Image (spheres, rainbow, N blue to C red):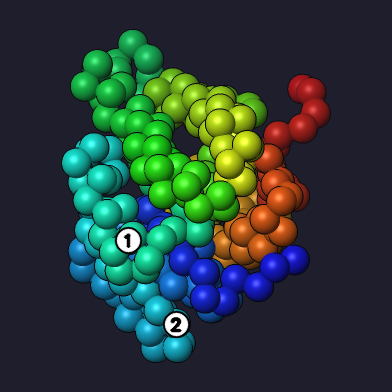
Amino acid sequence: MIKLEGRTAVVTGSSSGMGAEIAKALAAEGMKLVLAARRADRLQAVADEIAAQGGSALVHPADCSQEGEVEALFADAAARLGGVDLLVNSTGVPQATPIEEMSLQEWRAVIDANLTSVFLASREAMRLMKPRGRGRIISIGSVASQSPRLHAAAYVAAKYGLDGLTRALALEGRDHGVAASVLHPGYTVTGFGPGADGKPGRNAMDPRDIAQIVVLMASLPDEHNMLEALTLPLGMPFLGRG
């Protein structure tokens, strides 16, 4: 495994939940970060917590579903960090709408937040990583891409799309030393979706544990890639037949 100390990362969706915990875990390994999400005050709170622990995190508020804002984010990251070694895509919104009640506006909003944002950030990361011959992109998917959940057609479609996008990124990056992978968490206590409001245990995971898996994936030697990972709470009803 490689040391992450001194390497640089952009973490999107890092104002709360898994994204915030991932940012804190990477900072604890000595990485220099740019934190991105829409809520500037929440981002600053995460950055302040990282600084209090001796880490380094810059704040760049951005709506990662908007092309211009993502381009500005990576221009800022390149200028302030000197390049980007790691991108963690952790943006996303939940959904709980029966298909017959879903508007086209809601469909597009969910797809943009969960998939278009990943395309835009990954495109900008590739533009920086390919010329350097090194880099890694890790996207946070969902168990919903393996086993869909009810009343979440747009969310499920986005996460299935993210699975395919990851494979396309891995293929395009392969000859340039850029790895791409996806981590599919099951129910996690984040305030986001099923299991999100409980306590860590057999039926829901602690987001700090998800963050440590991201650290593991990021710490692989540059020439190795964990293409995908699926992690579930032991009690989650995923396997088996009724």
* Residue 174 picture location, percent across and down: 63, 37
Above or below, 190 relative to 230:
below
Sequence-first tag of 1 and 2: 2
Residue 107: x, y in percent? 31, 22
Q: Of residues 194 and 91, which is closer to you in this image?
A: 91
Q: Quadrant of the N terminus?
A: bottom right
Q: Residue furthest front?
A: 131
Q: Secondary structure at mark 1?
A: helix
User: Where residue 189 appears, x then y in whole percent?
Assistant: 52, 57
Disc 2, SS: loop
How many marks are shown on the rendered structure? 2
Quarter of the view holding residue 179: top right
Name the residue carrying label 2.
55
Q: Nearer the viewer, residue 51 or 184?
A: 51
Q: Is residue 170 left or right of residue 151?
A: right
Q: Residue at 60% across / 71% down in the picture?
A: 4
Query: Quick one: 174 or 235, which is closer to the camera?
Result: 174
- What residue appears at the point 40 percent right and 23 percent down from the top-left corner? 154
Name the disc covering residue 77, or none: 1
* Quarter the C terminus occupies: top right
Amino acid at circle 2: Gly
Q: Classify 10 Å Cα crowding around label 2: few (below 14), some (14-19), many (20 and above).
A: many
Q: Is 172 drawn above or below residue 4 in the view shown?
A: above
Question: What's the mark number on residue 188?
Answer: none
Label 1 and label 2: CA atoms lie apart by 17 Å
Q: Is residue 138 above or below residue 18?
A: above
Is residue 129 something that shows in the picture?
yes
- Please tell me which residue is depicted at 24% across the width and 17% down the height of the picture: 103
